[in-house]
Image (cartoon, rainbow, N blue to C red):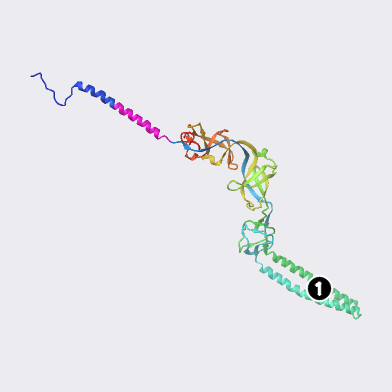
């Protein structure tokens, strides 16, 4: 009995464990394999779809080779308006920018003193006119009496002398009155020519003298464009070259041609003065206006992009170029070197070649390396039904 031990319930022998271990390992392996397959399927199902874009093929375009410079417009017919009399301004009839006709009133200077002066001259003139009338009557009577032999020739000559003296004095007084009347007209300042009123620095109540600038009158028909071109480009300047005057949006406001090139260099700015006559029939341009002028050096053919196709970050221009074919279309970012914007086109100096496909719509949704699709294809690059 001492060597006999009965089996205890629930206790396995080592032989029983041999079958359990391989089964457990197999189950764990299957679970890991299943988990790995699930990850691959999830990654595949969450891959970003291709971005829909529209592209254009870079082709040669005729682009003007040009440069833009700061310029000044000056009136070819500008009249400085100064008073011809002194006095206090009582009325200003215009404001800056008004269009006026020749003879239209600009300003009124207090005329009261001059009006009194005219009246003081008119009184003796009227009295002298009466003396002339009396002298005429006496001269005519003397002639009749002389012809009748009633008076001597000496008396007749004296009557004629009195008439001549009265007439001469009357003419002198008449001239003085007219001179004072002319002076009186100077107290109302009028426009010497038709045009546009410039700055009006004088206000009602100001005292003005003959040296006071009241305003300027600029004829709107034509202006002269003054451009200072760097001396480095002097060899490229020629009479007759096209010049465009640009508005605030960069659009062409007027077109002209160079009609003057200074033979001298401005020593302070190292530039050459260039002039062009600009027609201003619409009156949209103003005397002394600062503007931008574009000189056209020539026309060349080369790649160009519309302004909407180009993006700019931190001063660098770039576009997205579509590479590949079929379902393997990829957007690649290209940094560009561009010329000056002309007619909403950027000349491409470096970064693209003819035949490249550039994204023109949808670039805002792209990053470098994104898959893309073009109209007429599905997200896999296959023709859509």
64 and 21: which is toward the camera: 21
- Outermost residue toward the right in this view: 149
- Outermost residue toward the bottom in this view: 150
Q: Which residue is mark 1?
A: 166
Residue 224 seen from this side: yes
Q: Residue at x 70, y 65 (%)?
A: 185
359 and 67: which is toward the camera: 359
Locate residue 284, reporting x and y percent: 62, 52
Locate residue 10, reporting x and y percent: 16, 26
| Snapshot quadrant of residue 137 | bottom right
Q: How many marks?
A: 1
The answer to whether 73 is drawn above or below residue 184 in the figure is above
Q: Left or right: 21 with respect to 129?
A: left
Q: Left or right: 327 with respect to 36?
A: right
- Outermost residue toward the front in this view: 385
226 and 118: which is toward the camera: 226
Q: Left or right: 26 with respect to 276?
A: left
User: Which portion, as a residue range, is magenta?
Assistant: 28-48
| Snapshot quadrant of residue 88 | bottom right
Locate residue 325, reporting x and y percent: 50, 31
292 and 165: which is toward the camera: 292
> The N terminus is located in which quarter?
top left
Q: Secondary structure at mark 1?
A: helix
The answer to whether 203 is drawn above or below residue 72 in the figure is below
The answer to whether 355 is drawn above or below residue 124 in the figure is above
Locate residue 187, reporting x and y percent: 67, 65
In magenta segment, residue 131: no
């Amino acid at each position: 009995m001492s060597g006999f031990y009965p089996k205890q319930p629930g206790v396995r022998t080592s032989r029983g464990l041999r079958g359990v271990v391989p089964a457990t390992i197999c189950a764990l392996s299957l679970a890991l394999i299943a988990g790995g397959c699930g990850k691959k399927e999830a990654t595949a199902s969450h891959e970003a779809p291709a971005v829909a874009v529209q592209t254009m093929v870079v082709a040669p375009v005729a682009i003007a080779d040009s440069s833009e410079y700061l310029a000044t417009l000056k009136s070819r017919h500008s009249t400085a308006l100064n008073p011809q009399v002194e006095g206090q301004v009582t009325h200003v009839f215009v404001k800056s920018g008004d269009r006026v006709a020749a003879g239209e009133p600009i300003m009124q200077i207090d005329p009261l003193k001059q009006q009194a002066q005219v009246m003081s001259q008119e009184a003796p003139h009227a009295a002298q006119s009466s003396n002339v009338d009396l002298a005429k009557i006496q001269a005519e009577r003397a002639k009749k009496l002389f012809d009748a032999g009633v008076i001597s020739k000496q008396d007749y000559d004296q009557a004629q002398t009195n008439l001549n003296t009265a007439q001469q004095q009357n003419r002198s007084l008449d001239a003085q009155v007219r001179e004072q009347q002319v002076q009186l007209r100077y107290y109302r300042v009028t426009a010497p020519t038709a045009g546009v009123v410039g700055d009006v620095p004088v206000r009602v109540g100001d005292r003005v003298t003959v040296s006071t600038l009241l305003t300027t009158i600029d004829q709107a028909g034509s202006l002269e464009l003054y451009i200072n071109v760097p001396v480095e480009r002097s060899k490229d300047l020629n009479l007759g070259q096209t010049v465009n005057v640009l508005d605030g949006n960069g659009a062409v406001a007027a077109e002209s041609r160079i009609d003057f090139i200074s033979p001298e260099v401005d020593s302070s700015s190292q530039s050459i003065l260039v002039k062009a006559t600009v027609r201003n029939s619409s009156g949209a341009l103003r005397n002394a206006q600062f503007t931008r002028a574009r000189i056209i050096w020539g026309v060349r053919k080369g790649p160009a992009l519309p302004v909407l196709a180009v993006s700019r970050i931190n001063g660098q221009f770039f576009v997205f170029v579509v590479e590949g074919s079929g379902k393997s279309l990829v957007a690649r970012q290209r940094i560009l070197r561009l010329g000056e914007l002309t007619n909403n086109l950027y000349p491409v100096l470096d970064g693209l070649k003819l035949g490249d496909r550039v994204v023109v719509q949808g670039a805002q949704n792209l990053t470098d390396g994104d898959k893309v699709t073009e109209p007429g294809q599905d997200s896999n690059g296959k023709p859509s039904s």
